[in-house]
Image: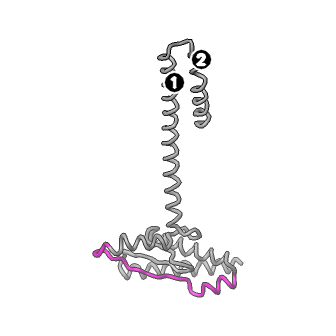
Amino acid sequence: FYSAIIIIGTALMCIVPPLTLDRTFEQGYYINMIIYAIIAILLVYKLFALTKENSIVRNKLLVQSYTDELTQVKNRRALDKYIRENVLTDHENRPIIILCDIDCFKMINDTYGHTVGDSCLKILSEELIQEFGYDSIFRFGGDEFIIFSKNSIDETAKSLVKINEILLEKIKLSSLSS
């Protein structure tokens, strides 16, 4: 749309001078200046629209670059940034750091297939997020997750036991329904 207006405006610039031959130079000059101003306004408007669109796309890409595609938790790149910006700088409020993985995950993938393995990872990540919060969970790789807990050791241990029980119950229910 804007490109068409700019092309039409440019064409008018070529047509207007011949139409103004019977007028004074000053009248043709003012008509040309009005057309130039309209084109400039449209160009500035389009530039602002493109800048806003670029900013939205940039923010989406930034979120994608810090998010694990499968589990939708933060990824290893986000973990590195989190450690640099939070753990290494805040000496007073050091969190408990937990490395969590699924026992025998390779066997799950080999026996039941990668679709079931992916489902296990998604379920685990959902439970971790629910218990510890989105900003505290990072997928380190494969079936490994890093958890930063600001709770006490006892509360953190209770949360992990609770998650384990929930996952075992979900596995039991899914095996009964198969």
In this picture, is 7 found above or below 124?
above
Q: Quadrant of the N terminus?
A: top right
On the image, the x and y values in percent for residue 76 come to 49, 74
**Judging from the image, what secondary structure is the residue with disc 2 in?**
helix
- The region drawn magenta spans 89-112
Q: Quick check: is 110 in the magenta stretch?
A: yes
Between the C-alphas of marks 1 and 2, the distance is 11 Å
On the image, the x and y values in percent for residue 146 come to 46, 78
* First-in-chain label (1 vs 2): 2
In front of the other: 5 or 65: 5
On the image, the x and y values in percent for residue 42 come to 52, 34
Which residue is label 2 attached to?
Answer: 19
**Judging from the image, what secondary structure is the residue with disc 1 in?**
helix
In this picture, is 59 found above or below 73?
above
Q: Quick check: is 103 in the magenta stretch?
A: yes
- Mark sitting on residue 121: none
Which residue is label 1 attached to?
Answer: 32
What residue is shown at x 51% (from left), y 75% (from top)? 139
